[in-house]
Amino acid sequence: MEVWYGLVERQAVRCGVFKSVKGFNSKLRTCIDDWIKRAHSFIRARTAGEILKKANRPTTTDPRH
């Protein structure tokens, strides 16, 4: 999320001069709408089974030190 907020800040907030809150909100909404139009779908590199297998693997160390 932080990366996305950084992009919005650079594209909408830093470059603008806003004389009202309404103008700021309008610019921000335009920036978000443009981002949504350009956004690409998320493509999974692994199957759910592969991810769960790695997430549920046994630990290699004893947590009781």
Image: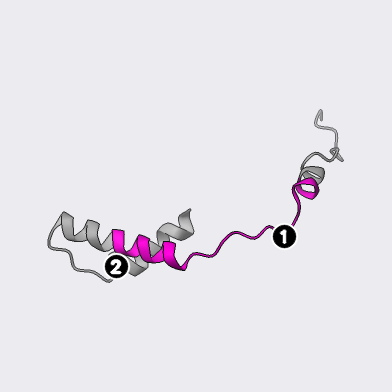
**Residue at x-position 29% and y-position 67%:** 14
Distance Cα–Cα, label 1 vs label 2:
35 Å
Indicate the position of residue 31 as horizontal and vertical percent values. Answer: 34, 64
The dot on residue 24 is none
Q: Which residue ends up furthest to the left in the rendered image?
A: 19
Q: Which residue ends up furthest to the bottom in the rendered image?
A: 15
Figure quadrant of residue 33: bottom left
The dot on residue 14 is 2
Disc 2 residue type (three-letter): Arg
> Where 38 sits versus 58, above or below?
below
- Which of the two discs, 1 and 2, labels the residue nearer the N terminus? 2
**Residue at x-position 13% and y-position 58%:** 20
Whether 13 is among the magenta residues is no
Q: Which residue ends up furthest to the top in the rendered image?
A: 64
Q: Are marks 1 and 2 in contact (CB under 8 Å)?
A: no
**Residue at x-position 81% and y-position 28%:** 64
20 left or right, relative to 58: left
Which secondary structure, mark 1?
Answer: loop
The answer to which of 26 and 17 lies nearer the viewer is 26
35 left or right, relative to 50: left
**Labels 1, 2: front one:** 1
User: Which part of the image, by quadrant, shows the C terminus?
Assistant: top right
Magenta segment, prevailing SS (helix, strand or loop): helix
> Where 40 sits versus 59, above or below?
below
Indicate the position of residue 10 as horizontal and vertical percent values. Answer: 36, 68
Figure quadrant of residue 62: top right
- Magenta residues span 29-51
> Badge 2: few (under 14), some or many (20 or more) residues near its Cα, within 10 Å?
few
Indicate the position of residue 5 as horizontal and vertical percent values. Answer: 41, 57
Mark 1 sits on what residue?
45
